[in-house]
Amino acid sequence: MAAKVRPIVFTLCQNMIVYDSTVVCVPLTLLIFSANSNMKTLFSFSFLLLLLAQKSNAQAPVNWTKDQLLEPSELAKTLATNKNIPLIYSVGPGALIPHSVVIGMTNDEKNVEAFKKKLNNVPKDASIVVYCGCCPFEHCPNVRPAINALKELQFTNYKLLNLPHNLKADWIDKGYPLSKQ
């Protein structure tokens, strides 16, 4: 007599989507079929190990508010007027936006420390913009450490340039100004 095949169902939060500052979980349901309980245990254990390994590489939650996002068009307008230009820090792989100060990728602790050092003599209420643009926010390893540094140092007037996809799609392809290199 053939063994009865029973499905094992796992539902987990695979992807997180941020919509209007609300985190929404997109469930991923997996069915694993096994012929006996030993196989079921093996599949379950293997799956949980895979899940734990994958989740350990997940980014920390968003550490900025919707009000702290600066639209690229707004920064581009400010740069065009050449008045009241905020301090602009690139915390990613390069500085393509005019007036940007290169910090380097802040997923590296020494660059976070360099960023903090550059901010030592800056007034706590100074207008500051940080950006990376290497990849979508949910994968970016640089914006969260930079925002954390600004919070830790108690800055009150900082913005994250809203580059949800990357610098190319959200700045360059829209024809916004580039620094002369």
Image (cartoon, grey):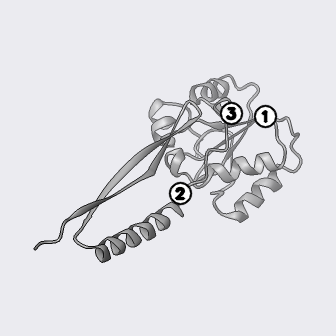
Along the line of sight, the residue nearer the viewer: 62 or 2: 2
Distance between the alpha carbons at the discs numbered 1 and 3: 9 Å
Left or right of 138? Residue 48 is left
Q: Marks 3 and 2: CB-CB under 8 Å?
A: no
Q: Position of residue 65 (x, y in %)?
A: 66, 35
Q: Quick check: 11 left or right of 112?
A: left
State the SS at label 1.
Answer: loop
**Residue indicated by mark 2:** 58
Residue at the spot of label 3: 68
- Label 2 neighbourhood size at 10 Å, few (<14), some (14-19), many (20+)? few
Whether residue 17 is visible, yes or no, is: yes
61 relative position to 172: left or right: right
Which of the numbered marks, if any, corresponds to residue 27? none
Task: Name the residue tied to disc 1.
Answer: 157
Which quarter of the picture shows residue 47? bottom left
The quarter in which the N terminus is drawn is: bottom left
SS for tag 2? loop
Residue at position x 30%, y 73% in the image: 37
Q: Residue at x 82, y 49 (%)?
A: 119
* Residue depicted at 67% across the width and 29% down the height: 67
Residue 74 percent location from the top left of the image? 62, 25
Q: Looking at the picture, how far across and down is residue 53, in whole percent?
A: 48, 68
How many angstroms separate mark 3 from mark 2 (CA)?
23 Å
How far across and down, in percent of the image, does residue 114 sit? 76, 59
Query: In the rendered structure, which amino acid carries the disc numbered 3?
Result: Gln
Q: Disc 1, disc 2: CB below 8 Å?
A: no
- For badge 1, the amino acid type reads Asn
Q: Amino acid at mark 2?
A: Ala
Q: Decide which of 8, 101 is in the foreground and name it.
A: 8
From the viewer's perspective, is the residue at label 3 or at label 2 nearer?
2
Depth-wise, is mark 1 or mark 2 nearer the camera?
A: 2
**Label 1 or label 3, whichever comes before in sequence order:** 3
